[in-house]
Image (cartoon, rainbow, N blue to C red):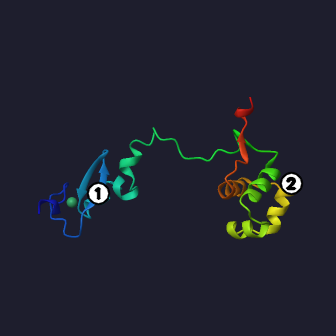
Amino acid sequence: MSSSFCELCGRPATDGKRSVLIDSTVFNVCMACSKRGKPYVSPSVGKRKTASTTFSSRVKPQRIQLTDDTVLNPEFASLIREARIKLGLSHEQLGARMNERAILLRKLETGALKPDEVFAKKLERFLGVTLYKSIKEDE
Ligand SMILES: [Zn+2]
């Protein structure tokens, strides 16, 4: 195997080859020669997503934007209540489905409690309602 020889000294790299950077060139060298350059970490070793990151500049990072353009609908209490009734569920039943406490849902429906973003998203999913609305739609 030709690959078993050090690219610097030419000796068989019996103790395993190292990839090092010397003058921004990658050499596969023996253990002794590896001290002459900087350790080179292959991109495929450090990052497994080399292929996809090549085009990553086109892809915007996935961010859930709730705070910028959307606000909690002030009618959220009645929205939740109506959606729940439409589904024919009691607080307890809905709570059980959502793995939340019924008392929490009661408080939401009276407006005593405001759902945070995560909880609102959960309610939207379970009830099929939109609790967060875009500010832009009101313009
Ligand atoms: Zn060598």
Dot 2, how many residues are within 10 Å of its Cα: few (below 14), some (14-19), or many (20+)? some
**Residue 5 relative to residue 31: left or right:** left
Q: Nearer the viewer, mark 2 or mark 1?
A: 2
Q: Tell me if I can see residue 122 in this picture.
A: yes
Q: Amino acid at mark 2?
A: Gly
Q: Which residue is mark 2?
A: 111
- Among all residues in the image, which is located at the extreme top? 139
Q: Quadrant of ligand 1?
A: bottom left
The residue that appears at 39% across and 48% down in the rendered structure is 52
Q: Tell me if I can see residue 40 in this picture.
A: no
From the image, which quarter does the C terminus lie in?
top right
The residue that appears at 53% across and 45% down in the rendered structure is 61
* Nearer to us in this view, 81 or 17: 81
Give the vertical position of 138 relative to 113 (above or below): above
Dot 1, how many residues are within 10 Å of its Cα: few (below 14), some (14-19), or many (20+)? many
Where residue 67 appears, as percent x and y from the top left, is: 71, 44
Q: Amino acid at mark 1?
A: Ser
**Residue 76 relative to residue 118: left or right:** right
The residue that appears at 12% across and 60% down in the rendered structure is 2
Where residue 13 appears, as percent x and y from the top left, is: 19, 65
**Residue 7 relative to residue 94: left or right:** left
Q: Which residue is mark 1?
A: 19
From the image, which quarter does the N terminus lie in?
bottom left
Q: CA distance from mark 2 to mark 1?
A: 64 Å
Where residue 10 appears, as percent x and y from the top left, is: 15, 58
* Kind of element beneath mark 2: loop
The residue that appears at 40% across and 57% down in the rendered structure is 46
Q: Earlier in the sequence, mark 2 or mark 1?
A: 1
Where residue 19 appears, as percent x and y from the top left, is: 29, 57
Give the vertical position of 123 relative to 99 (above or below): above
